[in-house]
Image (cartoon, coloured by chain):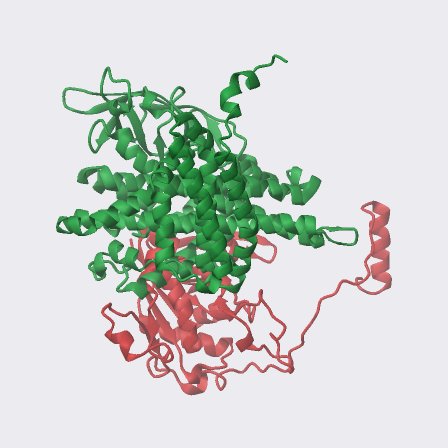
């Protein structure tokens, strides 16, 4: 019997210290509906108590129901028979439990049968379910992102019909964006959407690599404007599964075996337009994608947590040279690195989630009370900019981190880690997709660099300085400030250079430096509550500061020989 | 049709999570040191009731006898979908054996009145007697089927169940109303529902004094008060309740540690088995 919430001290630490008050007030509209729904909170404390109960129930399902089936789900994988996709039995058991526990409409308002939880809580649920089984999260986690997109952009009629279905959990869903020739470049989407005389929309064409494309409800990005070639000709559609869409095949994959990856063929399939035409990609997909990206950040964190725990357990049990291998510094240092990286990723994830919740909260509030638009304009602008920078940052950091942690997890297991008998190799395979889907790390860098160059990073750090007293942590605070100086020097140098290629070349370095610096400040904040976190901060800074300085030096040295000689370097002609 | 179902539940010490001070020096169970849980097979009983509710519709009333803290199993029942819960708590009920327990339960069931099914777990993990269900049925003079692992069919007036027997299993059909005792293999109990948990998280019995105060009643959300019945509420004769109503006498409790002794490998052949039989006969174990 295990509870993936209660047994995770660091997760509980974040739940206890994350500031949810303002978010709850927005989300609950000052508790106006507390008497309408029996399960709605009556005040702040009641809401927080309810959140803790939700996390406990989710943690227990993750630990007791989902995790015990994960090995078998990975072995059996998803089956494809006569055009039908069949989940592994363990996946179905997990979905049933989540449905029975009312967890499928996590963030959706109560009006539609959801739990009305903030993103922060949802990320905690994703972290726990992914620790249990990364593949399971893809079906569970998608559902809320899709429902949220419908909630934000679809008309009332569609909302009333489809949101309760999604919240009940009797159906599953997918977002169908990718096509054979439109992966990272979604502007190239070719699936066609057309209308008949009555105004009914139909879809034609092929979508590829669609997670859970077999689901009953799909959000489909399609070209509604004939003759258009770019993103402005694309609209978003809601498609409810019928016989006009065939699953042509499912992919055989390296990892996440329990999650079906489908090729969908639409043959004049009827669909409903979501929101307005022409903004399917530039508005709705970007919004959907941003929420999904935080979700992947949480998924990666969960995989890393699982990998770390397995490695730690093994290092304690495995005896060599008459002692546990954990006693060897070479092994314990690996564990220490894994643990600190995981905690860094967790701090970054929940910081991002809180900011996204603030942004969403203000947006919802303004929708209900347009007279407050002016009052919240500056705040909304601030949180939107922060969310746009931090979301790709956390997706990039956590997914790369999960790969490193899972890799070290196998290393600690030695030869056994390479074998199927242990879970380490599964975590390694499952982690590998996280820095690819919902946009590769390279694309996250493109998304994050703008904010860094335009002063968003600086504003965030200024905010930490203004709102916190780090006097008791002076030595560490000084180091963090040195990191900021290094990042700013690099930003200014790139600006002065005014060379697009040079900026692109160093973008990843700069994003990594900025991310590490933000993490240093988040650890500073955490260290105010815990002695142990102070030690974590100390250890983190010992490496992060020199690394940021080194990267800054690379940029300040105007390192660019690769740019100048890339053709020579890439060709075979010695 | 919709059924009236009464589920019998018990709060028990969690014997799977036994700590060092689980037993007192005199060999009795140190209940304070043990965490308490919903008796596992009673949770299977509740799940069976909830399955009937899902399929046909039902009103589920969960009944438990125990100290005020036993209200927790009633809250857990509400979190999963029970419609009503009743706590039978009275100092007069304390230290009851199965006879006194079934007496109290049967009177409470009579007070509830109408029922089609009474469902309980096969046995509780603290006593392992499996007697309370059958004795309650006897007192109520209703049909009973014990050790049920599957409800095969349910109609307006009859039920078909599969039940474990000493030598296998049997499928029987009988008339409603009936009392069933359910085994762990019957189902996997569902997790608590978040919505119901949040709705009933503040449900309290009036006798849980530590948590219950005026502020709770005044809170702007309607509090759910768990009904508590004492011996007067069910017209019970005090001499038949609790310790005085319990003829069972515990003479001695021993703490037994099971250890493996020597063992022999018997070859799976005619001569191997022949040798074993003659050895058992010569030691007068058989024959």
The C terminus of chain A: image quadrant: top right
The reply to whether residue B142 is visible in this rendering is no
* Residue closest to the far left: A371
Residue A19 location, quadrant: bottom left
Which quadrant of the structure image shows residue A279? top left
Q: Residue at x 44, y 76 (%)?
A: B66
Q: Say which quadrant the N terminus of chain A sits in.
A: bottom right
Relative to A546, A104 lies left or right: left
Q: Residue B240's quadrant in the figure?
A: bottom left
User: Is A401 positioned to the left or the right of A99 in the image?
Assistant: right
B140 vs B234, nearest the viewer: B234
| Residue drawn at 28 percent across, 18 percent down | A229
Residue A270 in the image: state x and y as whole percent. 25, 25
Q: How many marks?
A: 0
**Which residue is at 49% across, 86% downward?**
B244
Q: Position of residue B250 (x, y in %)?
A: 60, 81
Please, is residue A441 above or below residue B279 in the view? above
Q: Which x, y percent locates residue B280? A: 83, 60
**Left or right position of A24 against A345:** left
Give the letter of the red chain. Answer: B
Rendered colour, chain A: green
Q: Position of residue A89 (x, y in %)?
A: 49, 40
In the image, residue B241 above or below residue A37: below
Looking at the image, residue A284 sits to the left or right of residue A532; the answer is: left
């Amino acid at each position: 019997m295990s509870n993936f919430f209660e047994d995770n001290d660091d997760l509980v630490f974040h739940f206890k210290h994350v500031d949810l008050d303002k978010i709850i007030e927005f989300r609950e509209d000052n508790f106006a509906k507390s008497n309408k729904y029996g399960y709605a909170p009556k005040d702040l404390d009641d809401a927080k108590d309810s959140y803790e109960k939700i996390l406990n129930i989710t943690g227990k399902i993750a630990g007791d129901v989902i995790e015990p089936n994960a090995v078998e789900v990975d072995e059996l994988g998803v089956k494809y028979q006569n055009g039908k996709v069949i989940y592994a039995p363990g996946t179905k058991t997990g979905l049933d439990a989540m449905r029975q526990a009312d967890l499928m409409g996590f963030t959706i308002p109560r009006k539609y049968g959801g739990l009305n939880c903030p993103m922060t809580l949802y990320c905690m649920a994703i972290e726990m379910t992914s620790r249990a089984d990364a593949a399971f999260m893809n079906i569970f986690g998608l559902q809320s992102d899709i429902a949220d997109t419908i909630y934000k952009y679809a008309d009332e009629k569609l909302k009333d019909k489809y949101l309760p279905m999604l919240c009940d959990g009797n159906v599953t869903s997918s977002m169908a964006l990718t096509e054979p020739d439109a992966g990272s470049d979604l502007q190239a989407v070719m699936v066609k959407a057309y209308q008949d005389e009555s105004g009914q929309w139909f879809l034609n064409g092929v979508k590829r690599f669609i997670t859970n494309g077999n689901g009953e409800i799909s959000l489909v990005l399609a070209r509604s404007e004939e003759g258009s070639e770019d993103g402005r000709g694309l609209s978003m559609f809601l498609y409810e599964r019928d016989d006009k869409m065939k699953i042509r095949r499912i992919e055989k994959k390296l990892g996440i075996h329990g999650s079906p990856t489908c090729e969908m063929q639409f043959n004049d399939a009827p669909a409903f337009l979501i929101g307005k035409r022409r903004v399917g990609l530039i508005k709705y997909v970007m919004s959907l994608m941003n929420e999904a990206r935080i979700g992947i950040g949480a998924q990666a964190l969960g995989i890393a947590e699982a990998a770390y725990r397995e490695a730690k357990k093994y290092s304690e049990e495995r005896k060599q040279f008459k002692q546990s291998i954990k006693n060897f510094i070479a092994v314990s240092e690996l564990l220490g690195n894994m643990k600190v990286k995981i905690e860094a990723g967790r701090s970054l994830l929940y910081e991002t989630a809180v900011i996204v919740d603030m942004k969403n909260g203000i947006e919802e509030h303004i929708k209900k009370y347009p007279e407050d638009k002016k009052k919240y304009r500056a705040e909304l602008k601030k949180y939107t900019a922060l969310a746009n920078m931090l979301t790709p940052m956390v997706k990039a950091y956590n997914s790369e981190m999960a790969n490193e942690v899972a890799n070290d997890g196998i290393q600690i297991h030695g030869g056994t880690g390479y074998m199927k008998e242990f879970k380490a190799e599964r975590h390694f395979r499952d982690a590998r997709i996280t820095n690819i889907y919902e946009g590769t790390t390279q694309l996250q860098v493109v998304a994050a660099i703008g904010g860094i160059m335009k002063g968003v990073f600086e504003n965030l750090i200024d905010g930490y300085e203004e709102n916190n007293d780090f006097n008791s942590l002076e030595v560490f605070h000084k180091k963090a400030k040195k990191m900021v100086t290094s990042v700013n020097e690099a930003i200014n140098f790139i600006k002065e250079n005014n060379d697009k290629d040079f900026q692109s070349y160093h973008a990843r370095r700069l994003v990594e430096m900025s991310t590490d610096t933000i993490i240093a400040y988040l650890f500073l904040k955490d260290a105010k509550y815990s002695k142990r976190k102070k030690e974590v901060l100390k250890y983190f800074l010992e490496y992060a500061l020199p690394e940021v300085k080194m990267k800054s030096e690379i940029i300040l040295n105007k390192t660019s020989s690769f740019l100048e000689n890339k053709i020579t370097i890439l060709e075979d002609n010695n | 049709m919709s059924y009236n179902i009464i589920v019998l539940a018990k709060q028990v010490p969690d014997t799977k999570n036994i700590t060092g001070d689980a037993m007192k020096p005199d060999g009795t169970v140190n209940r304070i040191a043990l965490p308490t849980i919903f008796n596992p097979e009673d949770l299977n009983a509740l799940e069976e009731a909830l399955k009937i509710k899902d399929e046909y519709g039902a009103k589920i009333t969960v009944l438990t006898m125990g100290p005020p803290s036993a209200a927790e199993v009633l809250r857990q029942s509400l979190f999963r979908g029970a419609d009503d819960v009743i706590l039978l708590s009275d100092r007069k009920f304390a230290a009851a054996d199965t006879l006194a327990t079934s007496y109290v339960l049967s009177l409470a069931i009579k007070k509830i009145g109408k029922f089609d099914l009474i469902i309980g777990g096969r046995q509780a993990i603290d006593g392992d007697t499996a007697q309370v269900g059958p004795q309650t049925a006897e007192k109520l003079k209703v049909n009973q089927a014990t050790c049920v692992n599957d409800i095969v069919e349910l109609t307006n007036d009859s039920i078909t169940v599969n039940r474990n027997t000493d030598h296998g299993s049997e499928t029987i059909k009988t008339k409603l109303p009936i009392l069933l005792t359910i085994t762990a293999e019957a189902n996997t109990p569902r997790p608590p529902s978040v919505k119901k948990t949040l709705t009933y998280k503040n449900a309290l019995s009036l006798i849980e004094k530590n948590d219950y105060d005026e502020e709770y009643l005044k809170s702007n959300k309607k509090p759910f008060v768990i009904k508590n019945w004492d011996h007067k509420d069910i017209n019970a004769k005090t001499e038949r309740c609790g310790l005085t109503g319990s003829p069972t006498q515990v003479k001695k409790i021993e703490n037994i540690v099971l250890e493996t002794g020597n063992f022999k490998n018997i070859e799976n052949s005619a001569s191997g088995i022949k040798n074993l039989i003659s050895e058992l006969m010569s030691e007068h174990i058989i024959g």
